[in-house]
Amino acid sequence: MKNNLEGSSISVSLIIPIYNTEQFIERCLRSVFEQTFENVEYILINDCTPDKSIEVSERVIKQYPDRKVSIVNNQKNIGLAGVRNIGIKMAKGEYIIFIDSDDYVEPAMLEEMYHKAKVSSADIVIADYYVNYPQKQIYKKQVAPSTGTECARWILSGRLHSSNSNKLIKRELYLNNNISFIEGINMWEDMSTIARICYLANKVAYLPQAYLHYVQYNSNSYTTNITEKSLLDIQAVISILRDFFGQNNDYQQDLVFLTLKAKVDFIMHAKGDIRKKLCQLYNASREMIIKHPSLSVFYKLLLLLEKHRLYGFIDIFIVLYFIAKKIALKVKK
């Protein structure tokens, strides 16, 4: 471990898991090291990356000698959740934020989010974000309610994105409530943690400005490599959140949405017998599917086709959907 951190009065701990992002890591690091906010510690965790991400990182770090940086080299690959837990244990900052090493951020992010946290006495600050495709950038508004309990509902129901990277979170929320990422889970791992963290927060502040660039063209990222293991991860996250929120009637409709969203992922990404097996886990009536306020038309059609076991039509429908989506993106350019 390399460590040049001094003192313990740190405002923000910025944690970056590093794995297989050699093409993106330099841009990510320059964007965080060039923040206008000074009182930051940077914790970089190498999860046994097989490429030259660490060599690139060390070269960039040398160009920012005033930044407080720690590099942790894991002895074995433990996955994204385990890496983030290491970051939480190491962090000394009043607030924590996670940035993925293929994403990048705007220079004023930490200064403005931390200022918002202090003037609002907020446990969590949520900002807007950009989604970056190869030829397109989309602005995503994230207007959030001011209470943690309501914010958790919005996360579960899909009205707010569950990413950690557009959220500045008080470190004591993790420590005082024994909240950690579920190790071994690499899909929906944000959802499993953020929904619970939001529920436990007293005050949430919304900042109507985008800082995070959420990159959607890294073919090595967990979210673009959906496997049977990924689908089982989603199933595990659903179980965790059902256990946590299941006794509270206020969250039942939001949990229904979450399970149906999971079912859509099963329908779209699983094949054959595994698809049929996973889809049997979460059943909903035809009326519930049609009337659920948070389900898109696409979700409703897909779920109704599955309910009637029209798997041949499902595959055709998915292909047509993605063709239409590509055409729409080209038209908007």
Image (cartoon, rainbow, N blue to C red):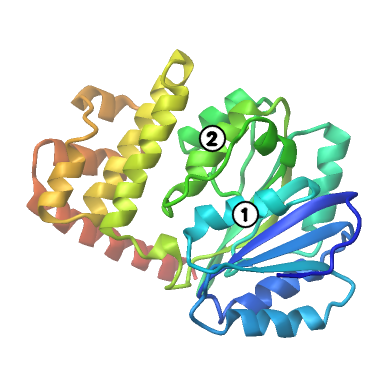
- Residue 195 image label: 2
- Horizontally, residue 34 falls left or right of residue 210, namely right
Q: Please, is residue 309 above or below residue 2 in the view? A: above
**In the rendered structure, which amino acid carries the disc numbered 1?**
Ile
Rendered image: mark on residue 302: none
Disc 2 versus disc 1: distance between alpha carbons? 20 Å
- The residue under the point 16% across, 56% down is 271
Asked if 299 appears above or below 34 in the picture, the reply is: above
x then y, percent, for residue 13: 76, 54
Whether residue 258 is visible to the viewer of this picture, yes or no, is: no
Q: Residue at x 57, y 67 (%)?
A: 74
Number of the label disc, if any, that sits on residue 86: 1
Q: x, y (%) of residue 139?
A: 60, 56
First of labels 2, 1 by sequence position: 1
Report the amino acid beneath label 2: Ala
Q: What kind of element bears circle 2?
A: helix
Q: Is residue 290 above or below residue 304?
A: above
Residue drawn 33% across and 60% down? 226
Whole-percent x, y for residue 39 in the image: 88, 57
Q: Residues within 10 Å of mark 2 (few under 14, many from 20)?
A: many
